[in-house]
Every structure is written in structure tokens, then in C-alpha cells.
Amino acid sequence: MGLKFPIFLAVSVAAFIMIPIGMLIVGSFSSSGLGEPLVPSTLNYEKAFSDKLFFPSLTNTIIFAVGSTILAISVAVGMAWIVVRTDTPMKRFAEFLPIFPLLLPPMMDNIAWIFLISPRAGIINRFLQDAFGLQPLFNAFSLSAMIWVFGLSQVPLAYLIIASAFTSLDPSLEESATVSGSGVIRTFFRITVPLMVPAILSAGILTFVATMRSFETPTLQGIPGGVFVYVSRIYSAMQLSTPPDTGLATAYSVVLLAITLLAVGLYLWSLKRVSKFQVITGRGYRPRIIAIGRWKYATLAFVFFYFAVAVLLPFFVVTVMSVMPYFSYSLLSENLLGSLTLRNYMRISDHPLITEGMFNSAWFGLSSAFLCVFIGFVTSYIVYRTRLRGRKFLEAIGTIPIAFPGLVIGLALLWTFFYMPGKIYGGPIAVILALIVFKLPIALRSLSGSIVQIHHELEEAARVHGGSWAYTFRRITFSLMKPALAAVSLFLFLAAFKEVGAVILLSGPGTTVAAVALFNYYGTGQWMALSAGAVVYSIVLFAVVVAARFIFKIKLRL
């Protein structure tokens, strides 16, 4: 392959990612507003550090991230061990249950738990009050509720990483412990968990970063209860202040970016430590299935309980609310069947932003997914199949956005577009660029892992027999990469379809996506219409996955 295209790609990707972040940092040190001549100043940071919510927001951010990470990792480790290493029945079905939350639309779990445990009108709180005379025990607008909802939503990410590691774990050390008289529980905590430290650490740090990047939970559950984290402070400064306080938002964004970059640095460091825990050798082995006796029914119940709480309960609650004229516990308990209506679905079908948003989401999702996969594939090929100087730097640049919260990316691009010629802001290019920057690390890391698995000998054999570089690439590398390319494309499309934080500041008339249109229902207090939109959204996402499974033969497996 010639050097011109790889060098052009490397420079383009670096500029594409670093220029907006550079503009954000420069803007944070300017006292001028968006689009105005820059005036060097530290006023924004002085304002941020003197903000009475700065340090409480920092504390809440750390507690929210740590709490969500502990909950997600604890559940994921248990379910991965159950599905991969035990004789729990129905495992072929149970292994897919932990990843079903990926199909839920944005905000559905938040909406459901607000209906369930809001302090005054929540279904659970009202039931306990009417049945037992108890005062409200739960509060959907509290830090603990935020941890509960977001922690459950992050289990699939941690589960996929940890389950893969369990699948590859050499069982000989566990077998030695069992022969020495160690029980199942003791072996699990003394042998299995220590061997899984790299995977658990990597999953934990990624979950921590994902929590720091989260937008919906802090906004929907935090702001109404006065529980601010940095993301919600950025959003409130940009969207809830009149006029928007862009200076304060940029200062908060840079501080948040520094924290997430530190976490990503720890993640990369943890990957380098993996070699100290390597237990996979050249010997052939099969994963050891542990017989847990009568406990296998308890473990199966645990998996189904998570599925019920994280998927079925939110979907059921939101579906019921979508056919109610208004939210009322007495209406639910006394006249549920007589109150059912399809008025909310008629309302969203007549709303132009919803229909337009679905089309825009599909178009932007397909475009960003295709471009992300293309850039990720070419970058992975350059890094692992060429000797181009600086290829590791290219990989590092492509991975950096994993530390960027979506709202920060949107704000960084906002600053950049205001100082560029043309009317990019508010147009489709702005939204697609934001989605590419935000999702590129997923494409790069996923495709890098796949291309590494293709041994050089296959390509070398084709070239030895007279195959050109183009022929070898097309018939060997690309052909073997097709399943991975299809799977990553589907995942990126779903992720882009659901994204709110990265695009909410950039979308405008004609470019509003469905997720932002639904979020606007929340902003105007139209909870029933929001529920109906979430149900329609989930049906669309499920239909996309089914179509991809049967039309393009994309398989969902560990």
C-alpha cells in the first residue's frame, strides 16, 4: 500500500479529534462568547471554582461513577461465572439475557424508575403507603437511585468483557484447588477472581468512564432532585441558563475531560499489566464446567431476576404508562382497564419531530456507522499490517475519544463550528461528525481485536502464489473480517440511534434526531407521550436487530 493515503488518514483523524478539543480548551481560557473574538482570561475557571456547586458536583460525580461501577461489575462477574463456568440449565438462552438492555431506547429505564419510585407519586411508594402506612422509602431523584438505574444499564458492557475472559481462562488451577479440597465458593474467591483481575479491572475502568460520560440519568433523575454531577452542570449551563453560560460550561467540560482522561490512562495501564496474570498456554484445554448441584436453579433465578428488573420491568411500566391518559396511582389501582387509550400514540404519530427524528436517526446512524467502520478498519490495518512510522500514535489518537463525554464532544464541536466558514452548525454534517468522534474508539478497538486474530501467514501465502496486495486484501483480509465488520456496524448504528448527549447541542431545525425529540417531551413534562415514544423506539431497535440477524446473518454471541 502506498504511503500517501495512510499519511493522509493519520493527519485527518488526528485533526478531526484534536482540533475540537483544542478549541474547547482555548475557549475555556477566553472571556468572550461563542463566535466572538477570543479574549484571553481565566475568568471561566475562577467562576467555576467559586461556583457553590463545583465541589459538591465533583463529589457526586465520583460517588455516582464508583457506585455504578461496583454495582455493574458485581452483577456482571456473577452472571458471567454462572453462564460460562457452571452447569446452570438453559444456558443457551440465559447467555443472551444480560445483553438485552442494549436494545432498550434511551431514557426508558429512567422513565420507568421515575414512575416506580418518585417520592410522591411513585407506584411502589404509594403501594407501601396505602398497604402499610409507610412514608415514601425511595426517591428516584436521589444519588442512590441514579447509581441503581445506571449501574444496571452498564451490566452488559462489563458482562461481555468478563464473560469472554471466563471463556478463555485455563481451568487447571481451579481443578488443582478442588483436588486439594477447596469448595466451589472458596475456589471462586481465592483462585478464579484473582486470575480475572485484568478483565475485571478493565471492565471496571471502562464502566467508570461510561458513568462519567452518561447524560440521561444525571439529567432526568439528578437535576430535578438537585443532585448535580459535572455533565448535568454543563447541560444546565448551556440549556437551562438564560443566556447560555458557555464560559462556565467549557470550564466544567475541561475539568471533566481531565478526570476521564486519567481514568482512560489507568485503563491502558491495566492492559499492559495483563501479562503478569497470563494463565493461557499452548496446551489444549476446554473451559471447566462446575457442577453446583441444587444451586444451579438459584443461579438461573439470579440471571432471570436481573433480566426482569433491568429489562422486563422498565418495558412493562413504560408500556402501561403509554396507554394511560395521565399518571395517577389511583387510576392504576382502581380503573386501569377503563382508562386505556391510544391517544398518546396518536399524538406522537402526528408530531413532525418524531417522524422526522426517526428518519434522521436512521440516516445519521447509517452514515456515522459506515464512516466509523471504514476509518476503524483502515486504521487497524495500518497499525497491525504495515510498518508505517507513527502507526501506534494513530491508534492512540483514535482511542482518545473514549474519554470524551458526549456532551463535551458536542460543546467542543460547537466551539469549532462557530469559528469555521460555512454554516455547519445545526446541519447534518455537525451531527454526523459528533457521532463519528464519539463512536470511533468502539470501531477501532473492536476491529483491531479482529484483525489481530488473522494470522500473517494467510496473507503471505496468497502473495507467494502471485496475489497482488489488492487481491490479497480483498480475498483474504476483507473476507475474513466481514462478520466483525457487520457486527460492529450494527452495534454502532444502534449506539448512534440512541445517542442524546453528543448531539443535543448540535441538532437544529431539520436535523433533530428521535432521541432528542423524545428528550424534548421530558422537558415539557409530557410523560405519557414520552412513554409512547419510548415504546415505539424500542420496537424499532428490536426490529433492526432481528432484520440484521436474518437478512445479513449477523450473529449475537459472546
Image (spheres, rainbow, N blue to C red):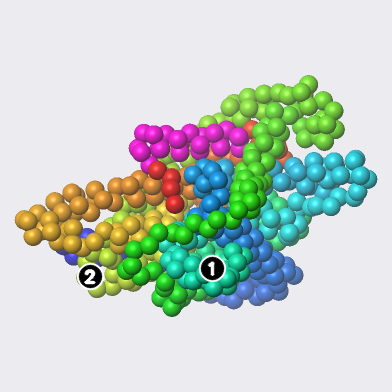
User: How many numbered circles are shown?
Assistant: 2
Query: Is mark 1 in CB contact (under 8 Å) with mark 2?
Result: no
Question: What segment is highlighted magenta in the picture?
Answer: 533-554
**Amino acid type of the residue that numbered disc 1 sits on in the rendered structure:** Thr
Whether residue 441 sits left or right of residue 144 in the image: it is: left
Judge the density around disc 1: few (<14), some (14-19), many (≥20) Cα neighbours within 10 Å: some
Residue denoted by label 1: 178
Label for residue 433? none
Closer-to-camera residue (164/343): 164
Residue denoted by label 2: 388
Q: Is residue 205 above or below residue 155?
A: below
Q: Position of residue 285 (x, y in %)?
A: 38, 62
Quadrant of the image containing the N terminus? bottom left
Q: Position of residue 486 (x, y in %)?
A: 35, 45
Q: Position of residue 462 (x, y in %)?
A: 12, 56
Q: Main secondary structure of the magenta part?
A: helix
Calculate the distance from the C-alpha at mark 1 to the C-alpha at mark 2. Answer: 50 Å
